[in-house]
Image (cartoon, rainbow, N blue to C red):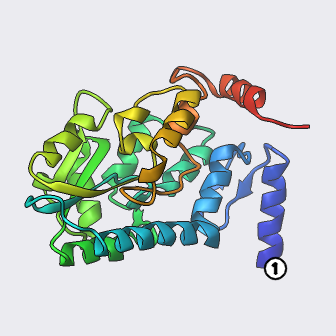
Amino acid sequence: MKYFFFTAIVFLLACNTSKKITAVGNTATLQNVSLNGKLFTALFQQRAAEYRALCLQGYNVAQMRIDNYAAQSTKPKAIITDIDETILDNSPYAVHQAYNSKEYETASWYEWTDKSAADTMPGAAAFLKYAAAKNISVFYVTNREERERISTLKNLQKFNLPNTDDIHFFPKTNTSSKETRRQNIMQQYEVILLMGDNLADFSTLFDKKTEAERKNNVDIAATEFGKKFIVFPNANYGDWENSLYKFNYKLVQVQKDSVIKFVLKSY
């Protein structure tokens, strides 16, 4: 019976109906829910064993890198990591917004992060604790904002992650580029790994570049991936999507849909 109920819901969603339905695992009655891209990518993130495998693969590679790393200086060693979709899983936020026929909104995002309710990504906690046991400091360089500091640290501390304090937390200030924050850390530490889900988490090569530039710069930095740069999967959002829209954040969904249909290949 449960399987039939779930199948019926998926069918209704896929047909883009506007009928009233109740989602499995959610007691709220939902209006006008369609199976938009954000719901589908969140479904992959929450339910696919392949997503779990990709995360574990990334952290396994990261562990091998620190195990085999030969120090280049006398500086203490450190890792710089992003938070969202690198350490914390925010897919429930995407689902919540989709259920309300919305995408990202600043106010609703603050409501989500204020809950300190995000789970860790598969393998994240074990890896960070392993790195700390190797006397490697962890710095959290995030584009969450200063107002989210307390709630974010609280969320990280729920899982007893290392270095979850003000000294190791670097939120966004006046720019989304992380380069200045990275350089500040590198002045005192030998950074052996950078981890993130967005290419801008690694280098200015990827700061608000066009789609073509991003692909070209990936090839330029090819030897760093799996060596110093550890990339985690995020099909839900990121500069890969923003670059398609030429970083025009004012586009409405209909306009975004037009862009997507224009750039996709078919036969």
Does the rendering let one see residue 25?
no
Side of 137 where 11 appears, left or right: right
> Residue 180 at x, y = what percent?
21, 35
Side of 204 where 98 appears, left or right: right
Q: Nearer the viewer, residue 206 or 3?
A: 206
State the SS at label 1: loop
> Residue 168 at x, y = what percent?
16, 55
Side of 263 where 213 appears, left or right: left
Q: Nearer the viewer, residue 133 or 214?
A: 214
Q: Residue at x 27, y 36 (%)?
A: 179
Q: Quadrant of the N terminus?
A: bottom right
Type of amino acid at the residue the image marks with label 1: Met
Q: Is residue 261 above or below residue 44?
A: above
> Residue 43 at x, y = what percent?
64, 60
Task: Name which quarter of the figure residue 263 lies in.
Answer: top right
Side of 154 where 73 appears, left or right: left
Q: Residue at x 68, y 53 (%)?
A: 40
Q: Nearer the viewer, residue 105 or 55?
A: 55
Residue placed furthest toward the right: 267
Task: Name which quarter of the figure residue 101 lies in.
Answer: top right
In the rendered image, which residue does mark 1 sit on? Answer: 1
Q: Quadrant of the C terminus?
A: top right
Q: Residue at x 73, y 48 (%)?
A: 35
Mark 1: give few (<14), some (14-19) or many (20+) Cα within 10 Å: few
Number of numbered discs overlaid on the protein picture: 1
Q: Nearer the viewer, residue 80 or 74?
A: 74
> Residue 232 at x, y = what percent?
48, 57
Does the rendering let one see residue 185?
yes
